[in-house]
Amino acid sequence: NAGVMQNPRHLVRRRGQEARLRCSPMKGHSHVYWYRQLPEEGLKFMVYLQKENIIDESGMPKERFSAEFPKEGPSILRIQQVVRGDSAAYFCASSTLTRQGDAQPQHFGDGTRLSIL
Amino acid sequence: GDSVTQMEGPVTLSEEAFLTINCTYTATGYPSLFWYVQYPGEGLQLLLKATKADDKGSNKGFEATYRKETTSFHLEKGSVQVSDSAVYFCALTSTDSWGKLQFGAGTQVVVTP
């Protein structure tokens, strides 16, 4: 009974490199969400995706960050040309169909801790 | 915009004490409200939820009641255990952005034997 699976658990990159974070949702879940947790802060929403569609990307930085959830395979959060300020824990969550007035609980993975040297 | 405000931590208390974590919110429409718990090194786990006014969510001895008149969703537990030590997050999804969880800053709870 696998929950939300994220990998890697820890990722170290040097400034200027690319970071690629993967998330496999719970079985039966078609909605994926990415959140970022900076040190000593709460979680901030980044992006909400369904298969092959971005539903809400209002929390994504305008540059260097992108996300996808292809028809086959995990969701990917990609950060290009990483900087020190990108160091954070990145959490993925998934849910079943959710709609206005009927928000389904989001189930979280254990996160990827990204460290930028 | 929508926001969630929680009491600051850390909250330190002895085993079997009563726990209250205050949470208030600002949102348009009728948000759904949630409490999540995060243990060290792990992701968030849903603790309880309420989707309309006067609903009471409960789980593992924790309770919270959706109070629309005071825009609050305070978390309570009558007798805490050392294993309840964690960070607790209050969160909402609003009717115009139902896919987005808006979190409070989190409250760290430390329970001592």
Image (spheres, coloured by chain):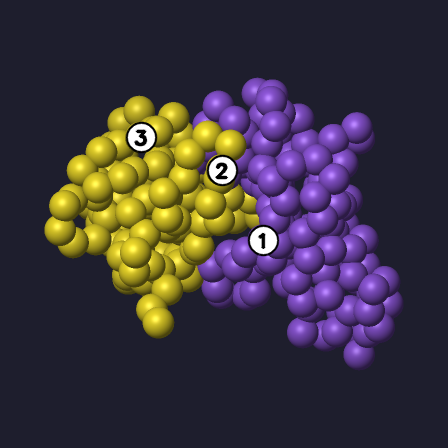
Chain colours: A yellow, B purple
- The residue beneath circle 3 is A55
Residue at 65%, 37% (x, y): give it.
Answer: B52
Q: Is residue B92 above or below residue A90?
A: above
Provide residue A35's location: percent of width, then percent of height.
42, 43
Q: Chain of mark 3?
A: A
Q: Which residue is mark 1?
A: B36
Helix, strand or loop at mark 1: strand
Q: Which residue is mark 2?
A: A102
Q: In this rendering, would A55 be left or right of B26? A: left
Residue B20 coordinates in the image, percent (x, y): 81, 53
- Dot 3 and dot 1 within a common chain: no
Q: Nearer the viewer, mark 2 or mark 3?
A: 2
Location of residue B55 in the rendering, given as x and y in whole percent from the top left corner: 70, 44
User: How far apart are the alpha carbons under marks 2 and 3?
Assistant: 16 Å
Question: Badge 2: how crowded within 10 Å, few (<14), some, or many (20+)?
Answer: some
Residue furthest out toward the left: A72
Say whether marks 2 and 1 touch (CB < 8 Å).
Answer: no
Label 3 to label 1: alpha-carbon separation: 23 Å
- Going 26% across and 32% down the picture, which residue do you hit? A54
Q: Amino acid at mark 1?
A: Tyr
Tag nearer the camera, 2 or 1? 2
Amino acid marked by disc 2: Asp
Residue count near mark 3 (Cα–Cα under 10 Å), binned few <14, some 14–19, many ≥20: some
